[in-house]
Image (spheres, grey):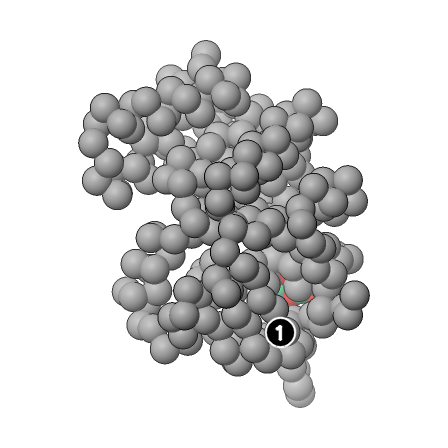
Amino acid sequence: MMIHLEKVEKSYPLEGGRTWVLRNVDLDIGEGEFVSVMGPSGAGKSSLLNVLGLMDHDWQGSYALDGVEVGKLNGKQRQALQREKIGFIFQHYHLIDDLKVWENLDLPLQYRDVPAKERAARVADLLDRFQIVGKKDLFPSQLSGGQQQLVAVARAVITRPRLLLADEPTGALHSGQARIIMDLLGELHGEGMAIVQVTHNELYANEAQRIVRLRDGWIEKP
Ligand SMILES: Nc1ncnc2c1ncn2[C@@H]1O[C@H](COP(=O)(O)OP(=O)(O)OP(=O)(O)O)[C@@H](O)[C@H]1O
């Protein structure tokens, strides 16, 4: 199992008690599996993704990623594991405003010491695929919302992570752009990448192999 969650719980303190966000979550995701997470607003979908992506470490229970018990790692080890294995598409794009589009794409490859020639080839390939070659020297603020989301998706996959976590990757996109992203997710899955996508769209959810439904922090039994 690539991901093994057992009795994962998350809550926030609230006057006089706690508000629960994840309840007793047991979840297994296999190597290379493509899973959709659905559920009403506030059900805990983003919270679950943050736990899976090691963005959040303030939870109880057990989470093993490739056999490594994540709760036992310190901050530095968590960051190293995250960098090694996980790509994240955020709901808000988190692009770096003072880097040009191509520099935003290049940066994660620099972190991983990918040689310059290979970096340039991968950046060119994604710009081409996403039909944003003409935007490569612009800054994020000079792009439309949909274009920014495309760049964010490109940045998340450019390092070819083993696990891709996508929080509404098509949320701000018109259907043509959304199709480009869904086709890309399908291809990456075909190449063996494990993908967990949060979506409100039943059609896109069904392109995954399995749908996990959350409600009030609980996983609904199928
Ligand atoms: N810092 C916080 N303090 C208290 N409650 C929080 C905090 N952050 C999130 N929550 C609560 O956690 C619950 C789950 O939020 P989460 O963002 O995971 O939901 P979601 O299913 O992703 O929703 P959406 O579809 O609207 O994005 C919500 O009820 C939210 O109010």
Q: Nearer the viewer, residue 176 or 207?
A: 207
Name the side, left or right, on which 213 lies relative to 187.
Answer: right
Task: Give the x, y percent position of residue 111.
Answer: 26, 43
Q: Which residue is mark 1?
A: 26
| Residue for point 30% across, 37% down | 109
Q: Is residue 114 left or right of residue 89?
A: left
Write the residue at 66% across / 30% down.
178
Q: Residue at x 56, y 77 (%)?
A: 6
The one of 161 and 72 positioned closer to us in this rendering: 161
Structural crowding at the residue carrying mark 1, measured as other residues with C-alpha within 10 Å and reported as few (<14), some (14–19) or many (≥20): some
Q: Position of residue 46 (x, y in %)?
A: 61, 57
Q: Amino acid at mark 1?
A: Asp
Residue at 40%, 74% (x, y): give it: 69
- State the count of labels: 1
Quarter holding the C terminus is bottom right
- Residue 156 picture quarter: top left
Q: Is residue 124 left or right of residue 31?
A: left
Give the secondary structure at mark 1. Answer: strand
Confirm whether residue 64 shows in the render: yes
The picture quadrant for ligand 1 comes to bottom right
